[in-house]
Amino acid sequence: MNDCETAPMADMMTDPIIDRMTFSTNADAEARARPPAQHPADVPLAPRYAALGGAYHVTVAPTPLPSPTLVHFNAGLADELGLSATQASDLTDILSGNASWPNYAPLASVYAGHQFGNWNPQLGDGRALMIAEIRRPDGTRAELQLKGAGPTPFSRGADGRAVLRSSIREYLCSEAMHALGVPTTRCLSLVTSPQPVFRETVEPAAIVCRVAPSFVRFGHFEWFYSRGQHDALAPLADHVIETHFPHLVGLPDRHAAWLGEVIERTARLIAHWQTVGFCHGVMNTDNFSALGLTLDYGPFGFMDAFRQHHVCNQSDFEGRYAYGAQPEIGQWNCSRLLQATLPLLGETEEEVGARATELYGRYSETFSVTVMRRWADKLGLREIRPGDADLVIRLLTLMQRGKSDFTRSFRHLARVQTDTDGPAIGVREEMADLAAFDAWVADYRSRLRAEGNTNDAERAERMNRVNPKYILRNHLAQMAIERAEEGDFSEVERLMTVLARPFDAQPEFEGYAAEPPPDQRRIEVSCSS
């Protein structure tokens, strides 16, 4: 199923809610005492989402993938999950949908959503299947999901498959974002097959195993609210709270408190996107996480040349999800979540309205504070003072005017010296208007001196911990894709190595920090990407 497409509502049967499961209060302590597991059968299950019952999901077996090849196995993540990396080949049948996780019935969940601002009354896991809910060795919980494992009742007539091209992009980017410190789903494995899949062209099939604490989305709540099944909202919210926000359990206003935290997490997430130059591309409400994670990597992109109105998705004809629009869209999506959870906010109309208004306002407050702090960190500023926002805006304006590379420009700012008033050699080369940039640098140096921030080596070290040297540029991903489609997976491995240390100088990979060649600066991605 194409992540961007819309389709008529399909028929679906739902059951009245729920079977509730109780868990030992000593479960976390017991889990932490366990040694790391070596095989899926040894990994303790924690089937809390499955326990919600048939109103929330359906059981469906994956469609076997013929002749699967394991392209990459994320050994580091496997270790965190309590799996043995040495048994990666033994897991291939499970990770390709050809076998089930021991003692767990795969399921697909139902949800709705606003896609490019338009209401779609039914979506759901059309090409994703949850194959396990497990407890990690550290006591935390993880859900494993196969993307591309064949059709489900929510596929809307599509094949439920994913292609190698888009799967490589998601695999690489989710781990790149994790290394950047951006909250995100992750990927455990990438499997491919010679089975043909028909998109714009015929492409090889692939499956990624995605991992997250939870895959619950804003759209899950929209589904039940839109159908008038308001009694299903509280059990779903309580599932998320009990599993992921345990400090709120038992509070009389736990639902409002949880929504406040989700809204604040979402605001902080998008502030992080903005300050690493990441564009999501499909910021539909069904692609927004109830935990504030980056979810569903489709036509995403890190900006090369900075443009406030950069659109990474060629299917986004009106630029709804342009880089500069992402903060506003994030708040709009939170408003849709609030609308869908109004029945949880109080008994009277006045009480509900007051709470919803207060919660809605938290987004802009949190975003403004967070994004300014992150911009200040990128400039190496210890404090935030009046005029700092203008300093940032002036720099971004210069970068846009000169089509300066976003990542390289910020990385090179660490070279600015405060003990001179001369040109910032090694920095200004990224700029087109040198006179205007020199004037900006003069004000920047004055600002650093004003707070006694003149230890250039110490400041450079701080800045290089927040301004990455390496990002997943489109041309790098494309190079890995083209080689993989020829059977050479070495570039996937190499990029995983480079992107795992985005802030570190890696002289042997210096070319991966370069701007894209002129003929590769306009690589376009669409909703099938």
Image (tube, helix red, strand yellow):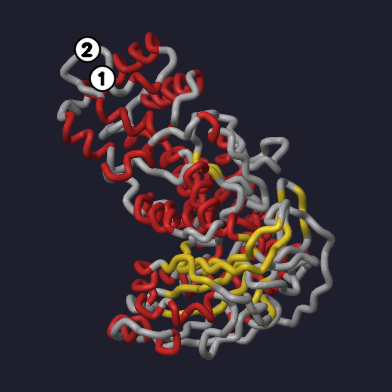
In the rendered image, residue 257, in percent from the top left (x then y), is placed at 50, 61
Residue 421: which numbered mark, if any?
2
Whether residue 503 is visible to the viewer of this picture, yes or no, is: yes
Give SS at disc 1.
helix
In the rendered image, residue 473, in percent from the top left (x then y), is placed at 47, 42
Whether residue 262 is visible to the viewer of this picture, yes or no, is: no
Q: Which of marks 2 and 1 is in front?
A: 2
Residue 445: which numbered mark, if any?
1
Residue 140: which numbered mark, if any?
none
Give the residue drawn at x 66%, y 69%. 195
- Contact flag, marks 2 and 1 (Cβ < 8 Å): yes
In this rendering, the count of numbered labels is 2
Image quadrant where residue 383 sits: top left
Give the residue drawn at x 24%, y 39%. 462
Q: Nearer the viewer, residue 303 or 59?
A: 303
- The vertical placement of 439 against 55, above or below, is above
Q: What residue type is labelled 2?
A: Asp
Rounded to the nearest angstrom, the CA distance separating label 2 from label 1 is 8 Å
Q: What residue type is labelled 1?
A: Arg
- The vertical placement of 508 against 318, above or below, is below
Q: Which of 458 and 513 is in front in this view?
A: 513
Give SS at disc 2.
loop
In the rendered image, residue 465, in percent from the top left (x then y), is placed at 28, 43
Query: Crowding at label 1, few (<14), some or many (≥20) Cα neighbours within 10 Å?
Result: some
Give the residue drawn at x 59%, y 78%. 97
